[in-house]
Amino acid sequence: MATIRDVAKLAGVSVATISRYLNKSGYVNVETEQKIKKAIEALNYEPNAVARGLAGKKTNTIALILPDISNPFFPELARAVEDVASMYGYTVILCNSDDEGVKEKSYIEVLKKKYIDGIIFASNTLDSADVEQMTKKGIPVVCLDRVPPKQSCSVVRSKNREGAKLAVEHLLSIGCRKIAHIYGPQEFITAKERLAGYEEAVKHLDWYSPTFMIQGDFRIEGGIRATELLMERHPDVDAIFAGNDLMAVGALKALHRMGVQVPGQVAVCGFDGIGMTEITQPELTTVAQPIYEMGALVSRILIKKIEGTLEADQTYELDVALVPRESTLRRNGHASS
Amino acid sequence: MATIRDVAKLAGVSVATISRYLNKSGYVNVETEQKIKKAIEALNYEPNAVARGLAGKKTNTIALILPDISNPFFPELARAVEDVASMYGYTVILCNSDDEGVKEKSYIEVLKKKYIDGIIFASNTLDSADVEQMTKKGIPVVCLDRVPPKQSCSVVRSKNREGAKLAVEHLLSIGCRKIAHIYGPQEFITAKERLAGYEEAVKHLDWYSPTFMIQGDFRIEGGIRATELLMERHPDVDAIFAGNDLMAVGALKALHRMGVQVPGQVAVCGFDGIGMTEITQPELTTVAQPIYEMGALVSRILIKKIEGTLEADQTYELDVALVPRESTLRRNGHASS
DNA sequence: TAAGTATGTGGTACCGGTTACACATAAAAT
DNA sequence: ATTTTATGTGTAACCGGTACCACATACTTA
């Protein structure tokens, strides 16, 4: 592999000139430029990114720390992040934290040592102290769907509370009377907000009772269990709003096993808008987040922070949209009494 | 950030000794060791990975090039690769090639410049010349589910042909008479082999005809279209074996729209064993590949090649397993005539 | 005409590690 | 008593770039 000094020698100029030519920093004569071009061509020279990284403390690499890439929410997000990153000449390192603080920290250690240019957090454990520590060391951080207490970094999120209300309103509008909510683990701000939105939307209704709220785990299995428990406790429920799509899928599964018709007897609505919702039977109504756009945005923001084009830490709240599908098809008058 | 020279100064020794201590290469006196430890502690020293990379031409980074992480087959694979990699102290770079040669090549360019230690290919376009070029430059490559013509790298794959036969046999065993096959794009060796396996299994049966084989695109949409075409052409089909799960999901969707009962009138079987197969209604029978194990294996092999523990290029063929589910429930005698 | 400015280039220290080599000492082998 | 051998440490070149600074010309401008 040829080095910059080889090129310099062959072109008959100094390495400084080559470097200036490569980075378009400073003056280079047109004729010199031609000679350099030829030399580079002849030697098949490619500047070494590691050396550049060492000299310039910039590696053109960002990290994406998420709980688990095999959670169906994240592949699309990761794809968006990588698309944008590669468009800007950055490379993406993938980290699965399983939402465990220890793993997150250990990734961060490694990433710092590797002179990573910035980090996207879609994982949950980190507190604002950790984030501040990063940003102070000059490593930009952007968070997804989580807000460190003190605004210590930019944040991209979507309107969970509003989304939850949208879901409830939609369920009411199709004639549902008793709408239950399966909420996710309250460590997740998304789960908290969706629960809050649900409560806000239903608390004024006469049937309202905390017993309609039941905990899930943001996964299919938890959705199943919660639904079983719920239907036992409240056989009169005619709609389930799940805190995310996976739990909604679980609800669908559980109801099907119990022989309960969806949407005939119970309507089901999820949250997130993952691809899975289109392949269930019936297809699942969901409050869709713009997952790809979120990933693209978070990536773009990070890169702008890295390149100094963006200064202030801001919170970006993206709109969600209700996607009505078969699982909440309107009742023909004969809504449950 | 403290450097090795700071540590050396504080500990009152030379950088060489620090380096030897850090890498456990060469002698270091026990007392010196203690002094170094203290100094490192005091300065909160962390060796700089980029500098190490430059000096040692080893970055402890591998790349995973796949078509698209949002294709449901790959997240689990990626997770496995990353799990094993991080276990061995490696970091994983994610690349989405969309199966486009241009993108693959451009990723490879970047990766080479970054002194990446090795590459896992789960993408399809590369020919053996490209691979050879890599391996000659000392960058180990391991391929997944694709065999470069001349064995120029290690390969991990699964028994596609056998799997296809398994599927056909299973469908026959539950009483199916006319089994169609939706095959994937023939650029993919997996599609080719599964088609071959199918043909081999059915060509001796009296109803056999090439018209039972129909092309899909390895995605849901293609599965739908192929199924529509197929049912029009052959209303007498009583089983569909799809070349992958996504197309099987498409088949399920199409049949449902047509009002065809699954498995009552037509049984459906997929291939791959992605998570989605468990959430369709009916749940989908599939020939499951050990996706996680494949990822873990491919990652382990790559790292062994990097570290020189493994020499010869080998092909690892993993077993597949038929997972019978609702979409191929046994008929009660009344199979279609 | 002198000073100022835009253009063009080279020398070299530096980024933060690794490692070959030289050198010193103490213990073991001959 | 002398040569080996094992142990321990330091000097400095090197990995392959970047960028500051000095220096040389050629035009402008005052």
Image: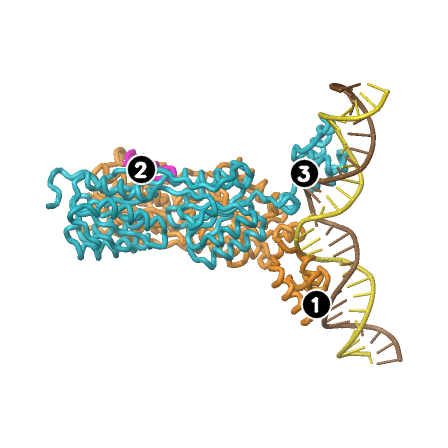
Chain colours: A cyan, B orange, C yellow, D brown
Residue A93 in picture, x, y percent from top left = 51, 48
Judging depth in this view, the residue of A295 and B36 nearest the camera is B36
Chain of the residue on which disc 1 is drawn: B
Mark 3 or mark 2, which has the lower sequence index?
3
Density class for disc 3 (Cα within 10 Å; few <14, some 14-19, many ≥20) is some
Is A70 displayed left or right of A284 in the figure?
A: right
Is A204 in the magenta?
A: no
Question: How many other residues sit within 10 Å of disc 1, few (<14), some (14-19) or many (≥20)?
Answer: few
Question: Is residue B217 found inside the magenta-colored segment of the image?
Answer: yes
Q: On residue A44, which mark appears?
A: none
Residue B317 falls left or right of residue A50: left
Q: Amino acid at mark 1?
A: Tyr
Q: Secondary structure at mark 1?
A: loop
Q: Which residue is mark 2?
A: A321
The residue to which callout 3 is attached is A45
User: What kind of element bears circle 2?
Assistant: strand
Residue at mark 1: B27
Q: Name the one closer to the observer, A19 or B276.
A: A19
Assign the C terminus of chain B to one quadrant of the image.
top left
**What's the residue type where badge 2 is placed?**
Ala
Q: Residue A76 falls in which quadrant of the image?
A: top left
Q: Are marks 2 and 1 on the same chain?
A: no
Whole-Å distance between the Cαs marked 2 and 1? 65 Å
Residue at 41%, 54% in the rendered image: B290
| Residue at image point 23% right, 39% down | A170
